[in-house]
Amino acid sequence: MKLNQRSFGKLYDKLASKIYRFVFFKVRSAEIAQDLTHDTFLKGWQYCQKNEVEFPQAIFYQAARQQIADFWRKQKFQVVSLDAKPLEMIDDQPSLDERLAKNDELNQMFAVLATLPEDQQEILTWRYLDGYSYRQISRILNKPSGTIRVTAHRALKQLKEKWNQC
Amino acid sequence: MLKQFKSFKQIRPDHAWLRKTKDQLMADFFVDQKSSGIFGDGWAIKVGSLATAFILAVIGTTASVSFAQNSLPGDLLYPIKIAAEKVQFKLANNGSTKADLGVEFANRRLHEFSQIVNESSADELAKKEKDLAQVVGDFTKQVAAVSEQVNNLVVAEPSNALPLARQANLEAMKYENTLLDADKKISQTRTEAESPKKELKEAMASVQQIKADYLKVLAVLDDAQHNNLDKKNDSDQVAGDQDFPAVSQGDTGNLPSATTTITVSTTTNEILN
């Protein structure tokens, strides 16, 4: 399937918030998450124009992972303290960062989640936040669906244990 | 727990931004495809590297937590830093690790205190009373937690408690020096505000308290070590068992007074008074 204007519009409506959240988890800045989400759609679209894609979501998540990896690679060479840079408010509402910073429980969950291996964090996000099936996640990660199922169960168990310890 | 995890769903982008980005992308893709230069020849090669993203995307949430590490009280990311520390402390396996973490976190709080004091003018310092109070409050909690862990180890693992108590005592001396430096800086700013001086006094008092505690602990552990050696010499046994005799809670309650050996510098006394 190749994306046309209509199908891209639908896909964007369905996926943009999820991609944004996926990126935000990894960069923890609304401003950067917006930039990387934009670039993710650009790259994903470009790929889908040249290739037949069965499950476009997988391509967009893979593009998001690449954007995040590129971002962090650049950070290694150019240390920028986000703390020193005031975050711009998007509108009159408190920024997402601000809302999160004030929510102790969310922060604690975020900190617990960060103790899990990267693949487990991603699988939990896709499964329990984005509502993807094991089969769909297996297509994003190019791994057997059984492996995803086992990893998800293991991740959830670890998350529960660590959460209960806190 | 899953309910708390699902509360991450409230992380959503700004609606206006979502719409604006969609319009922008649609315009780029469908209005001016040829002239946009989006479909560069190099893209096919770049797409191949998507697969490598699986390997490269190893830095993520964990790294983003570290984004908050340089934050100071009052910064948006500071609560994230504190939450991460709490989790790290609670997940620590044993008392020894907890004590090490406590020492590290106490150092961070003092570093934050110094940073605020060093980087603020007299006017700014007056406005940061709440932040300074938070830092000092957390510092006091951390040193108390370390002290508690050391005391627990005296009973449970006396052989591990001795090096830890020595280290903690050395750290307490460093805390004192850092606070003295901060005091000098506060004096230089000639701030009229009571705030930083009050917090400094509280921090110094807690340092003096833990120093006294550590000296008592060290005295007990040293005595225990000597007794152990004496017993061994008396019975002419070949040294084999290097463990210290267990010290009961009751013993720690009747510790020899070490207060006479505490030397409080004149400057420290000035702060405390």
Image: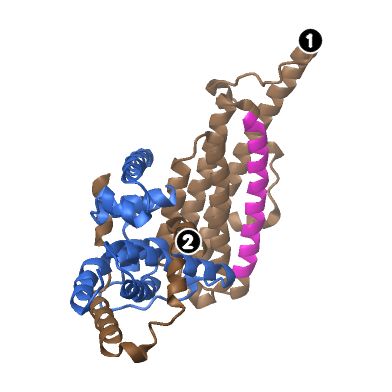
Chain colours: A blue, B brown
Please tell me whether residue B23 belongs to the stretch shown in magenta.
no
Which residue bears the numbered disc 2? Answer: B52
Q: In x, y percent, where is residue A6?
A: 18, 77
**Residue situated in front as seen by the camera: B164 or B200:** B164
Q: In x, y percent, where is residue A166?
A: 38, 42
The amino acid sitting under disc 1 is Gln
Pointer 2 local density, CA inside 10 Å: few below 14, some 14–19, many at least 20: some
Looking at the rendered image, the disc whose residue lies closer to the viewer, 2 or 1, is 2
Kindly state the secondary structure of the residue where label 2 is placed: loop
- Could you say which disc has been placed on residue B237 in the image? 1
Kindly state the secondary structure of the residue where label 1 is placed: loop
Q: Quadrant of residue A163?
A: top left
Q: In x, y percent, where is residue B66?
A: 49, 59
Quadrant, the C terminus of chain B: bottom right
Q: Is A3 above or below relative to B198?
A: below
| Res. B6 visible in picture | no
What is the span of residues highlighted in magenta in the rendered image?
B160-186
> What is the chief secondary structure element of the magenta stretch?
helix
Q: Is residue A115 left or right of residue B200?
A: left
